[in-house]
Amino acid sequence: MQLTQPSQEIPIAEQQVLFWDDATRRDRFAHMEDYFAGLEVSPAPQPHRFLPGDGLPREVSDAIAAYMRESGAVGVMVVKDNAVRYTNSAEDFGADARWTSFSVAKSFTSTLLGAAIADGAIDSLDDPVTKYVPALAGSVYDPVTVRQVATMTSGVKWNENYTDPNSDVARMLATPPQPGEDQSVTYMRTLEREAPPGTKFVYKTGETNLLGIIVENATGRKLADYAYDKIVVPAGFADPMFWMVDLSGRNIGGCCLSLTLADYARFGQFALEGGKGVVPDGWFAEAGAASVKLDGDRFGYGYQWWTYDGRSFGAQGIFGQSVTIVPEADLVVAIVGNWPTATSGDLARKRGELVARIAASVIDE
């Protein structure tokens, strides 16, 4: 594992990823390591080899290609029964090219939380956050548990509006850390409560950063280093992983690791298969179940995984990143993209419909 520094320094005024124009995003999403400091992680000594598979029905392949054109997706991979049934990438996005994950990284941090529990470094999800992050003592996080941070039900007030330059998510990593303090802790200590712990879901990237600090403090290891043993090697990543660090040198638990399209699919396959002894038995069934139900129970949120109709669950990131797992179809669908806006209800709906169509085309095979 190696700390890397950017080869092209981005002025502070331009570091707000949320407000880059389309061309800038398209270039930098594929080269985040050139612009931000982070940790480079070696690939697995024995990469996981997907089997070759038959293609998808023509109308399904056409639907995927149409979604890619409409949404700005640069790569889609479909894996069924550990066999690649479809892969398609933009001409300038090769098989060994990496793409940023944004909040797909949250599901990596969740997996490392499970590994830390399996290793005995974290005793229980119901432990107080302050047991592992003592610097939060005396703050609004005093009564909050690790589980409530994992499910984003802490009751702490937060603004995740990606179009607002004054939102918490925009300001968090622009706020310098206090001397000797983690950057996320410096910011999160200033927040206020809006509901009793465990009673209200509010999506907060800052809390996944705290979850990363919990794992790092409990294990005594950087997230990227721990991920090498607990995800990269057992999942068999074939190419190096890059994970950004904040101003205090911590990996950013809620964002910003970069992988190849195939390695995103390998992560999905690893989760589909249950974690290969790295996490507690049944961890992904629990983490990928709806602890919080949303939109009339059609969607939900688990431990840093989104949940969908049926038993499917997935990792999602802004601008169209996703890894969706459909256990009943033994299916993984990985997508990396460049939506024209950070979020889009219309494109999210079309992505969900597309994955459902793919699953329906292969489920009875």
Image: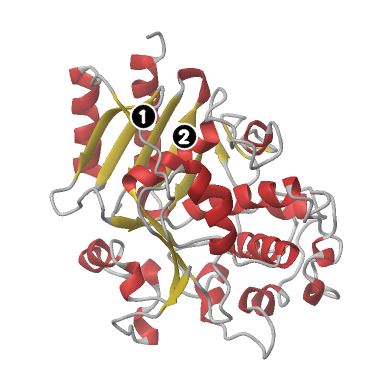
- Compared to residue 344, the image places residue 78 above or below, namely above
- Locate residue 207, reporting x and y percent: 65, 61
Identity of the residue drawn at 26% across and 52% down: 96
**Residue at x 20%, y 34% (from the top left corner):** 66
Left or right, 354 with respect to 280, comes to: left
Is residue 194 in view from this perspective? yes
261 in relation to 327, above or below? below
Whole-percent x and y of residue 48? 40, 39
Look at the image and tell me in which quarter the C terminus lies: top left
**230 or 329: nearer the viewer:** 230
Q: Position of residue 356 (x, y in %)?
A: 40, 24
How many marks do you count on the picture?
2
Kind of residue indicated by mark 1? Val
Q: Which one is earlier in the sequence, the residue at label 1 or at label 2?
A: 1
Task: Please indicate whether residue 156 sits to the left or right of residue 73 in the image.
Answer: right
In this view, which residue lies farthest toward the bottom? 179
Q: Are marks 1 and 2 in contact (CB under 8 Å)?
A: yes
Give the residue drawn at x 39%, y 76%: 36
Q: CA distance from mark 1 to mark 2?
A: 8 Å
Instruction: Determine whether the residue tagged by mark 1 lies in a helix, strand or loop.
Output: strand
Element on which disc 2 rests: helix
Label 1 CA crowd tier, 10 Å (few <14, some 14–19, many 20+): many
Q: Is residue 341 visible?
A: no
Mark 2 surroundings: few (<14), some (14-19) or many (≥20) residues within 10 A = many
* Residue plotted at (55% across, 60% down): 254
Q: How is the image coloured?
A: secondary structure
Q: Residue furthest left?
A: 91
Work out whether residue 349 or residue 93 is closer to the camera in this orientation and state it: 93
Residue annotated with mark 2: 269
Please determine whether, in this image, residue 179 is positioned above or below residue 77. below
Mark number for residue 79? 1
